């Protein structure tokens, strides 16, 4: 019988997903084929119905475009005042995101989802404002036209001839909870346009001649219907997955027979340097959405592509950024063979389909050259040869392309290398010419000494040196100059370009070919070495940070190490901001130039990157990355890199994310180490408190009870018995006094030891006198028990605190009285460098449970027998250990050979001074 129980991991993941979805607001999008179909009207009509039903509906922004029917629906609905922003001498009215978050209505209407916010706004796009509103738990309604979808932007532009620049990532529509299609027929929309219900008359006339042609409207309507059907299909597929037990249940019940749409493989979009690369990415995103598979985008940088102009490099970065916005995982690959690198990437990522732009048709003589053996193959043919098992899709060319904003990402190039390489200028070619001249001057005196073949080798050596130092172009120039110099100065007839022997023509050709080939190979090796150095540098910085963070024990160490590692890799300035005990971000007291605390706090609260090279507050000069640990966000990493455009290179962005993750994990580890230490301290404190209360509740309450009973009995006892009762009261008071003294002494000693300043009054003492005074002080506890002494003759004077050592002996004598049996023997002997004191009884000895771990007797609140009628709080021996340790000595316990327990105190000693010196 098959186990039809659900997968626990799948259930936990589903519960977490449901919980996150419950906390997130819902998004409803009114979707249409073009402007004028009635999206805003339908949205406001639904809002009026919700207001009538009693829901809190608020208009954040609604664009009526002068349409009276739409404006009439605003009546009775609360509207949020727009925020005014100054821009280039005029004032722009924008949606007030902060006011909407503070108001937090049940339903918020935010029209024109693809709108671009004015400079100075928190987000560059309105759809990003909507994402923040949804994260705050607010239900948002918005409107969107089909031409504003990023993946359809090129397709719609090709159909209508009109390119819109305000776009929305497809993921926004895909993740919408509801998509309401607002549709009208092309004829009805044309009639509305002619009636002035869409645009003003002049605008309507131009629109009818361009965008609002019937063929365009029919095509746009089909695209909108298909896109809406895809969203509905996604909803059906999601429902089927849930009903089939997250796609993996085979059990019986209502999920029986339902199977999730399972596709294998993924899509790899091949980004090239040509103009149509953006259309390739859009097509791959559309295809991935239709197939519900993951997709990737990769750009291969070869030595030739490394020399692209700045504008072309900007276009590549923009396309990679577009791919990330559409949900792709991007990468910049390096190698000499583009097809080989793409095929290897596809195999590594388990991609089943390659999407690439269609190559331009060959023109002129190239049409015939392509059939020549050994001619370069188109990329699609090379990919088919390297990866015959993969599907290859070619995308038609598009006229549009994407560009990056020139500020603040100035001054860097799209190298996978970590350093910014300046383009080769004329000094490199000047050095190539100077090298050829120098070789000619060096070889001139050698004309009669060396054969011409050897002189050729010297010229080839110069080409290799130029290629290694300056690259391919200067090495080609050096090869040409060297051939010319060899012909003019060394080949007969000399000082002429004429050639007397036809064989030298072959020599010139071979020399030029070898020079160019060597220069090409050397430049390629130089490029490969630079790539390897870059990768090694990234790996080394990550390894060093991980190694250093593993030894960090405090948050301050993690902050210092993390900031230093990021600065060392990216240059510029970097800050690691952590949280305080209240889980609030601790901002620097003296922030550096350009650092914005509000942006850092926003990145921390929302768990998203912001600032430079992001879509949120992109005008900032700092890049803010939340330190996302497995449990929570632990802080923010703020970076102002030396080369801002590095943040757009996928490898560098991934490196920054990896460094931030390592710092976050280290902060979380240190946090839980501190939590564990605090828990241990609290547990130990609780244990000591319970032990103290238990001891006091038994051993202090007993003498107090006895004292109260004896004091009350004095009122009824006859006078002749008062003396006996008084003696009993004195005995109980002494016992209570001893307990309190032990507690106070232990507290004083522990305080002194913790502070490192136990005040010892050391003086040269007679051991015999201290032993005698200790026996007299313990007489009350000893009673009639006889104490014997075994003191070595002629004991020397020893330097110690007589009061504290006497206290040690008294506690040992009282312990022997309580747990041992007479006779009690106190011994003392002098050994080289030490004084040994012993206190021994003749009782049963130490408990069997303590044999082998006798030092536990000296712990606070520890007694030889856990349950005993013998009074005491277990501090006497702990006080002895504290006093002996303060003197630099040791105390030990054990069983004597012939029975009984024996305690040994070993104190360090030095030779006593001369009598005259002692008097001083």
Image (tube, rainbow, N blue to C red):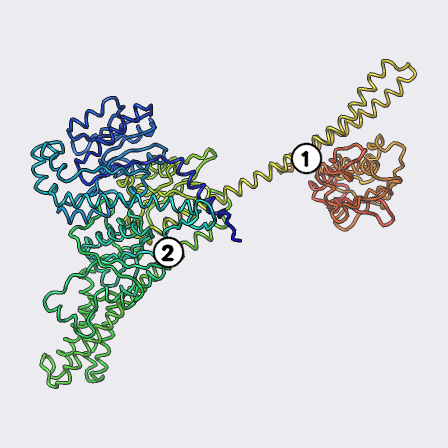
Q: Secondary structure at mark 2?
A: helix
Compared to residue 110, the image places residue 443 above or below, namely: below
- Does any portion of residue 593 appear in the rendered image? no
- Does any portion of residue 16 appear in the rendered image? yes
Disc 1 to disc 2, how far (Cα)?
Answer: 55 Å
**Label at residue 538:** 2
Frontmost of labels 1 and 2 is 2
Q: Secondary structure at mark 1?
A: helix
Coordinates of residue 8 in the picture (x, y in percent) = 50, 46
- Quadrant assignment, res 500: bottom left
State the quadrant of the C terminus: top right
**Label at residue 749:** 1
219 vs 737, nearest the viewer? 219
Coordinates of residue 792 in the picture (x, y in percent) = 85, 46
**Label at residue 283:** none
- Quadrant assignment, res 839: top right
Mark closest to the chain's N terminus, 1 or 2: 2
Q: Residues within 10 Å of mark 1 (few under 14, many from 20)?
A: some
Compared to residue 26, the image places residue 249 above or below, namely: below
Compared to residue 422, the image places residue 163 above or below, namely: above
């Amino acid at each position: 019988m098959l186990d039809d129980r659900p997968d626990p991991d799948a259930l936990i993941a589903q519960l977490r997903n449901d919980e996150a979805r419950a906390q997130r607001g819902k998004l409803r999008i009114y979707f249409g084929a073009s402007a004028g179909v009635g999206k805003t009207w339908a949205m406001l009509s639904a809002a009026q119905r919700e207001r009538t039903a009693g829901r809190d509906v608020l208009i954040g922004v609604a664009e009526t475009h002068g349409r009276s029917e739409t404006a009439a629906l605003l009546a009775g609905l609360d509207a949020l005042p727009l925020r005014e922003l100054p821009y280039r001498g005029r004032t722009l009215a924008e949606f007030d995101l902060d006011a909407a978050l503070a108001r937090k209505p049940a339903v918020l209407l935010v029209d024109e989802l693809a709108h671009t916010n004015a400079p100075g706004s928190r987000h560059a796009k309105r759809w990003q404002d909507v994402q923040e509103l949804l994260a705050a738990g607010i239900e948002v309604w918005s409107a969107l036209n089909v031409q504003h979808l990023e993946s359809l932007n090129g397709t719609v532009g090709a159909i209508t001839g009109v390119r819109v620049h305000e776009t929305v990532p497809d993921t926004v529509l895909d993740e919408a909870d509801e998509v309401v299609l607002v549709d009208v027929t092309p004829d009805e929309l044309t009639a509305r346009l002619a009636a002035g219900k869409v645009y003003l008359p002049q605008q309507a006339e131009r629109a009818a001649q361009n965008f609002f042609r019937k063929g365009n409207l029919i095509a746009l309507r089909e695209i909108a219907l298909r896109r809406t059907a895809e969203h509905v299909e996604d909803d059906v597929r999601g429902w089927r997955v849930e009903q089939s037990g997250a796609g993996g249940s085979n059990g019986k019940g209502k999920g029986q027979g339902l199977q999730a749409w399972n596709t294998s493989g993924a899509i790899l979009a091949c980004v090239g340097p040509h103009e149509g690369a953006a259309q390739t990415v859009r097509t791959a995103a559309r295809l991935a959405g239709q197939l519900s598979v993951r997709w990737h985008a990769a750009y291969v940088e070869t030595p030739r592509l490394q020399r692209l102009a700045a504008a072309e490099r900007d276009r590549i970065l923009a396309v990679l950024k577009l791919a990330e916005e559409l949900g792709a995982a991007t990468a910049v690959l390096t190698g000499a063979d583009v097809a080989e690198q793409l095929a290897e990437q596809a195999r590594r990522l388990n991609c089943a389909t390659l999407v690439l732009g269609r190559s331009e048709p060959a023109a002129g003589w190239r049409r015939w050259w392509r059939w020549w053996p050994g001619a370069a193959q188109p990329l699609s043919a090379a990919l088919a040869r390297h990866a015959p098992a993969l599907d290859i899709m070619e995308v038609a060319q598009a006229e549009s392309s994407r560009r990056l904003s020139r500020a603040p990402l100035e001054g860097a190039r799209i190298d996978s290398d970590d350093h910014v390489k300046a383009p080769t200028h004329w000094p490199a070619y000047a050095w190539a010419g100077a090298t050829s001249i120098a070789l000619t001057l060096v070889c001139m005196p050698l004309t009669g000494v060396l054969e011409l073949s050897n002189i050729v080798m010297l010229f080839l050596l110069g080409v290799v040196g130029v290629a290694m130092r300056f690259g391919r172009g200067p090495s080609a120039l050096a090869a040409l100059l060297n051939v010319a110099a060899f012909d003019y100065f060394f080949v007969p007839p000399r000082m002429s370009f004429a050639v007397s022997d036809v064989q030298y023509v072959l020599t010139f050709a071979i020399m030029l070919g070898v020079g160019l080939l060597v220069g090409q190979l050397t430049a390629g090796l130089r490029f490969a070495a630079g790539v390897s150095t870059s990768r090694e540098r990234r790996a080394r910085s990550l390894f060093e940070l991980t190694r250093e963070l593993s030894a960090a024990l405090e948050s301050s160490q993690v902050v210092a190490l993390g900031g230093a590692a990021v600065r060392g890799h990216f240059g510029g300035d970097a800050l690691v901001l952590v949280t305080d005990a209240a889980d609030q971000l601790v901002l620097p007291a003296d922030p550096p130039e350009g650092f914005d605390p509000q942006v850092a706090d926003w990145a921390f609260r929302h768990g998203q990157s912001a600032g430079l090279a992001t879509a949120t507050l992109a005008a900032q000069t700092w890049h803010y990355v939340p330190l996302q640990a497995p449990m929570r966000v632990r802080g923010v990493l703020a970076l102002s890199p030396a080369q801002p455009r590095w943040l757009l290179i996928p490898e560098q962005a991934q490196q920054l994310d990896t460094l931030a993750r390592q710092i976050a994990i280290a902060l979380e580890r240190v946090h839980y180490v501190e939590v564990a230490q605090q828990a241990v301290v609290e547990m130990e404190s609780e244990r000591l408190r319970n032990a103290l209360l238990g001891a006091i509740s038994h051993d202090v309450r007993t003498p107090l009870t006895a004292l109260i009973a004896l004091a009350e009995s004095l009122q009824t006892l006859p006078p002749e018995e008062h003396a006996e009762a008084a003696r009993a009261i004195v005995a109980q008071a002494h016992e209570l006094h001893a307990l309190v003294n032990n507690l106070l002494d232990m507290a004083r000693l522990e305080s002194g030891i913790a502070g490192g300043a136990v005040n010892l009054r050391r003086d040269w003492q007679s051991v015999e006198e201290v032993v005698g005074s200790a026996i007299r002080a313990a007489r009350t506890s000893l009673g009639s028990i006889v104490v014997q002494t075994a003191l070595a003759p002629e004991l020397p004077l020893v330097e110690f605190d007589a009061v504290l050592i006497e206290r040690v002996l008294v506690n040992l004598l009282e312990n022997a009285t309580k747990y041992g049996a007479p006779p009690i023997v106190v011994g003392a002997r002098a050994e080289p460098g030490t004084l040994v004191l012993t206190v021994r009884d003749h009782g049963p000895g130490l408990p069997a449970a303590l044999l082998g771990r006798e030092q536990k007797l000296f712990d606070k609140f520890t007694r030889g027998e856990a349950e005993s009628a013998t009074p005491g709080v277990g501090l006497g021996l702990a006080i002895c250990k504290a006093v002996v340790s303060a003197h630099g000595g040791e105390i030990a316990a054990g069983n004597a050979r012939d029975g009984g327990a024996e305690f040994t105190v070993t104190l360090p000693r030095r030779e006593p001074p001369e009598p005259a010196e002692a008097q001083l």
